[in-house]
Image (cartoon, helix red, strand yellow):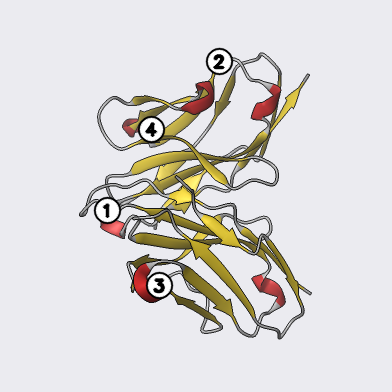
């Protein structure tokens, strides 16, 4: 069974440009999470999808970030326009829907974003 | 506010020595706890988890962790470290009350001396 995959693995862009990150969760996982680790800081939650619906987007830093999960399969996270402080590693995780019980999140390899 | 503290940013141990990585949490709900590991150039791999029941949990690669509710701790241990264990280790806490999103510690970088 394939794990969580993320694309691209690395991205280097200039300030003001747009970048789109993609996450493919484990097949059958309804829950999809985005997290981010900026340099020297903790990994922080960004948002949570249940199927195609945003369940919690309390961690999204500002309106330059737009996440979508059309059809409840893969998800994209767009940063537009990118700023220097957006540099970091963006992780995606997925988990099964266990109907209100504890779940285990499985993480992808991350996308390393560098904004120059 | 929920928080996870990993007090050691870096730890160096000799190969074959025992290891303990500390994790303390502050959480306003019944927590469930994880340890993840990130090897260089890799993603986050689940080492072990605690949901309920036996407070001593076994994980992959010979790791174990013990949940101590009275101390709000979930320390990770390994009796004999191998050079391949060099990586960054993250403690994470979640709760149903907060929608299962995870709160992570800052990470502990483990270096293994040969």
Q: Which mark is residue B71?
A: 4
Q: Are marks 3 and 4 in contact (CB under 8 Å)?
A: no
Horizontal and vertical percent for residue A13? 75, 75
Query: Does residue A101 appear left or right of residue B67 in this picture?
Result: left
Horizontal and vertical percent for residue B108? 62, 39
Q: Nearer the viewer, residue A54 or A57?
A: A54
Instruction: Tell us which disc is closer to us: 4 or 1.
Output: 1
Q: Nearer the viewer, residue B10 or A13?
A: A13
Of all chains, the one bearing label 3 is A
Residue placed under numbered mark 2 in the picture:
B79
Of all chains, the one bearing label 2 is B
Residue placed under numbered mark 3 in the picture:
A57
The reply to whether residue B6 is visible in this rendering is no
Q: Earlier in the sequence, mark 2 or mark 4?
A: 4
The vertical placement of A9 against B56, above or below, is below
Residue placed under numbered mark 1 in the picture:
B96
Q: Residue B80 falls in which quadrant of the image? A: top right
Q: Judge the density around disc 2: few (<14), some (14-19), many (≥20) Cα neighbours within 10 Å.
A: few
Horizontal and vertical percent for residue A109? 59, 52
Q: Residue A78 falls in which quadrant of the image? A: bottom right
Q: Judge the density around disc 4: few (<14), some (14-19), many (≥20) Cα neighbours within 10 Å.
A: few
Of all chains, the one bearing label 1 is B
Of all chains, the one bearing label 4 is B
Residue at mark 3 to residue at mark 4: CA–CA distance: 32 Å
Horizontal and vertical percent for residue A6? 57, 60
Residue at mark 2 to residue at mark 4: CA–CA distance: 22 Å
């Amino acid at each position: 069974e394939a794990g969580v995959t993320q694309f691209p693995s690395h991205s280097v862009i200039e300030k003001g440009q747009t970048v789109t990150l993609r996450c493919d969760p484990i097949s059958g996982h309804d829950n999809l999470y985005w997290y981010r680790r900026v340099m020297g800081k903790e990994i922080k939650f960004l948002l949570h999808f249940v199927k195609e619906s945003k369940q919690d987007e309390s961690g999204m830093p500002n309106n330059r970030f737009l996440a979508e999960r059309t059809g409840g399969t893969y998800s994209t996270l767009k940063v537009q326009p990118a700023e220097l402080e957006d540099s970091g590693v963006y992780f995606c995780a997925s988990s099964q829907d266990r109907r209100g019980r504890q779940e285990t999140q499985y993480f992808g390899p991350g996308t390393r974003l560098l904004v120059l | 506010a929920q928080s996870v503290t990993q007090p050691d940013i870096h730890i160096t141990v000799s190969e074959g020595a025992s290891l303990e990585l500390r994790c303390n949490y502050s959480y306003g709900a019944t927590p469930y706890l994880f340890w993840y590991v990130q090897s260089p150039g890799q993603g986050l791999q689940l080492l072990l988890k605690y949901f309920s029941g036996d407070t001593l949990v076994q994980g992959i690669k010979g790791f174990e962790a013990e949940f101590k509710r009275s101390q709000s701790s979930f320390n990770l241990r390994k009796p004999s470290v191998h050079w391949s264990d060099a990586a960054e280790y993250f403690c994470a806490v979640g709760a149903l009350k907060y929608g299962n999103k995870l709160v992570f510690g800052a990470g502990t970088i483990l270096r293994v001396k040969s």
